[in-house]
Amino acid sequence: MSEEQKNTVEEAIETVLGEEAVEQEAVEGTLETGDEQSALIEELTKKLAAAEEEIKEQKDLVIRAQAFSQNEIRKAGIDAENRRKSVLKTFANALTPVVDHLELAIQHADKENETLKPMVDGVEMTLTELLKAISSIGIQQIDPMGETLNPEKHQAMSMQVVEGVPANQVVAVMQKGYELSGGQIIRPAMVVVSKEA
């Protein structure tokens, strides 16, 4: 074996074995016989195969860790969205009776009475601002007058025959409904629907 080949083999051995102790005589050149070289090559091949297997296992662990963290991030996002919707629903359930009462006050006010006109105007402005405020946070009012009955959004309280109106049309709204901007119903609208004669 030439001196250059010997040095190359020694460098390869040191690189593969790393911090393991290499016997002094192997470094100094006692790797003359073919049997010793074959044994060393076999040992290095086994260590290389073991190192490749360990790399494969580490890659698998990294992939699993990444998948786990992505799943956790996705779950946290879903949980946060569900909490947000729950808080909005609770908030809407607290405010919708206020809107109902303001609408009733306007509906039953004597609009011809000039003395009450400023008060009615004030209640109307309050109602308008309240509706804008709840709309800005994603709560929409459902006013289905004239629409076809939708059991997901409307609760039919009664039915009546109305001339010239097809069956299952909303002919009166007893109480408006509310929904979140994503379509989740907070409260269905209570309606009267038409029926065939």
Image (tube, grey):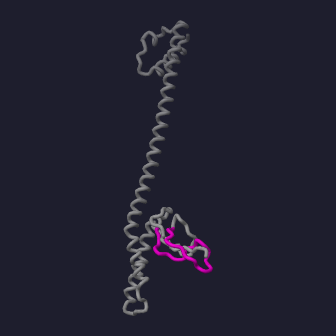
Quarter of the image with the N terminus in it: top right
Q: Which residues are magenta?
A: 154-178
Q: How many marks?
A: 0
Foreground of the two, 133 or 142: 142
Which residue is rendered at x = 51% and y = 77% of the image? Answer: 172
Which percent across, then down, holds residue 61? 47, 34
Foreground of the two, 189 or 134: 189
Residue 146 sits in quarter: bottom right
Which percent across, then down, holds residue 8? 52, 18
Foreground of the two, 180 or 19: 180
Quarter of the image with the C terminus in it: bottom right
When the figure is inspected, residue 154 is found, relative to residue 116, above or below; the finding is above
Which percent across, then down, holds residue 39? 52, 11
Taking the magenta stretch, the answer to whether it contains residue 170 is yes
Outermost residue on the front side: it is 197
Foreground of the two, 128 or 175: 175
Which residue is rendered at x = 53% and y = 14% of the image? Answer: 42
Which percent across, then down, holds residue 2? 55, 11
Which residue is rendered at x = 47% and y = 22% of the image? Answer: 15
Q: Is residue 169 left or right of residue 187?
A: right
Which residue is rendered at x = 48% and y = 8% of the image? Answer: 30
Question: Magenta-highlighted stretch: main secondary structure?
Answer: strand
Taking the magenta stretch, the answer to whether it contains residue 79 is no
When the figure is inspected, residue 89 is found, relative to residue 10, above or below; the finding is below
